[in-house]
């Protein structure tokens, strides 16, 4: 027989609120006066209302730039020291996290283990809703425990509400094990912020479709995660100028991008770029160092190894001695 146990407050750790009143203070759960009567509007009017609300996202993210910068440097230090960036999320937030994590290897040639994600409900929840799992802090603790977080790692919890028990439980566990922690949320003074070392808050306000945090909240989270990983990889030297020098050339589009990057960085013609890429073992960083420092492949590899993959430092070998 079906029961109503799902409607009862979730049992949780001390840091996770379990009263229905907690939802009353969440701006992301309130009704948006700007979109009242949405179901009576034309398609164009609906699009205009949503677009008007979306225009607020970048401004909300801008206010959080100081905290974002702190997290960028923390992620860069963790990865430089051999640690990992581990995202934890549920629902739309978890899907945004999985997208950012999965884009790092092809964009920056990171190892799959360097940037990871944990999703409430597991990988199957990416394609189908598994929202009940997010009410359990114990499941969050269990899932992060399987990754064995250490002092070298940074664990970032992503939750629009900032109170998702699964995420709070995971971040709280990671912090207790010595990992650095951060939170990305769209509400202030939340349970997640209490268990994180650094909290990034993007106050996007009420959603056009009340409570649908896959909209403005998710857009803000996507922008923030883009900044975190792109910023960290840039700080690590996996970007040269503003170019994707660590691009993983696994398909025709990425091969062409690699050729164009080398042509621009080294101011060479296409044929020279192709020959150099081949002699560099199809590695753009090695090719860049070979040409910019006028060294052979073996020396370019040595320099990149010595610089932990930092292309600019590898080019100027004298800086590696500092």
Image: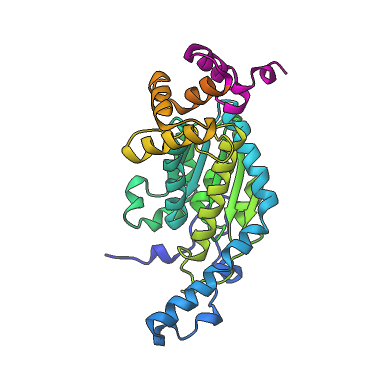
Residue 248 placement: quadrant: top left
Q: In front: 31, or 294?
A: 294
Residue 239 drawn above or below residue 223 = above
Question: What is the quadrant of the N terminus in the image?
Answer: bottom left
Q: Residue furthest left?
A: 1
What is the number of callouts on the image?
A: 0
Residue 298 located within the stretch drawn in magenta: yes
Residue 247 drawn above or below residue 132 = above
Q: Which residues are magenta?
A: 293-322
Spot occupied by residue 265 in the image (x, y as percentages of width and height): 53, 33
Question: What is the quadrant of the C terminus in the image?
Answer: top right
Spot occupied by residue 81 in the image (x, y as percentages of width and height): 60, 26
Dominant secondary structure of the magenta stretch? Answer: helix
Residue 9 located within the stretch drawn in magenta: no
Residue drawn at x 46%, y 68% is 212
Residue drawn at x 56%, y 41% is 242
Q: In front: 93, or 102?
A: 102
Residue drawn at x 59%, y 69% is 205
Spot occupied by residue 96 in the image (x, y as percentages of width and height): 45, 52
Q: In front: 201, or 7?
A: 201
Residue 179 seen from this side: no
Residue 61 placement: quadrant: bottom right
Residue 67 drawn above or below residue 142 = below
């Amino acid at each position: 027989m079906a029961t109503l146990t799902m409607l009862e407050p979730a049992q949780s750790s001390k840091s996770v609120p379990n009263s229905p009143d907690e939802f009353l203070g969440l701006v992301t759960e309130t009704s948006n006066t700007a979109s009242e009567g949405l179901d009576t509007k034309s398609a164009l009017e609906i699009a205009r209302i949503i677009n008007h609300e979306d225009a607020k996202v970048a401004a909300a993210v801008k206010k959080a730039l100081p905290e974002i910068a702190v997290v960028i440097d923390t992620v860069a230090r963790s990865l430089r020291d051999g640690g990992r960036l581990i995202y934890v999320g549920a629902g739309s937030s978890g899907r945004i996290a999985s997208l950012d994590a999965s884009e790092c290897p092809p964009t920056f040639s990171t190892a799959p283990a360097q940037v990871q994600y944990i999703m409430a409900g597991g990988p199957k929840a990416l394609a189908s809703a598994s929202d009940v799992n997010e009410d359990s802090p114990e499941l969050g603790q269990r899932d992060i425990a399987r990754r064995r977080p250490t002092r070298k790692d940074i664990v970032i919890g992503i939750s629009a509400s900032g109170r998702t028990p699964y995420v709070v439980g995971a971040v709280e566990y990671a912090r207790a094990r010595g990992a650095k922690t951060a939170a990305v949320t769209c509400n202030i003074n939340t349970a997640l912020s209490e268990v994180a070392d650094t909290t990034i808050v993007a106050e996007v306000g009420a959603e056009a479709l009340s409570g649908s945090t896959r909209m403005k909240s998710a857009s803000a989270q996507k922008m923030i995660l883009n900044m975190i990983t792109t910023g960290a990889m840039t700080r690590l030297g996996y970007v040269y100028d503003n170019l994707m020098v660590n691009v993983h050339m696994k398909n025709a589009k990425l091969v062409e991008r690699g050729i164009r990057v080398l042509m621009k960085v080294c101011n060479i013609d296409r044929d020279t770029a192709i020959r150099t890429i081949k002699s560099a073992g199809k590695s753009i960083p090695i090719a860049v160092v070979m040409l910019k420092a006028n060294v052979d492949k073996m020396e370019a590899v040595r320099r990149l190894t010595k610089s932990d993959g930092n292309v600019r430092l590898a080019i100027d070998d004298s800086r590696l001695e500092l």
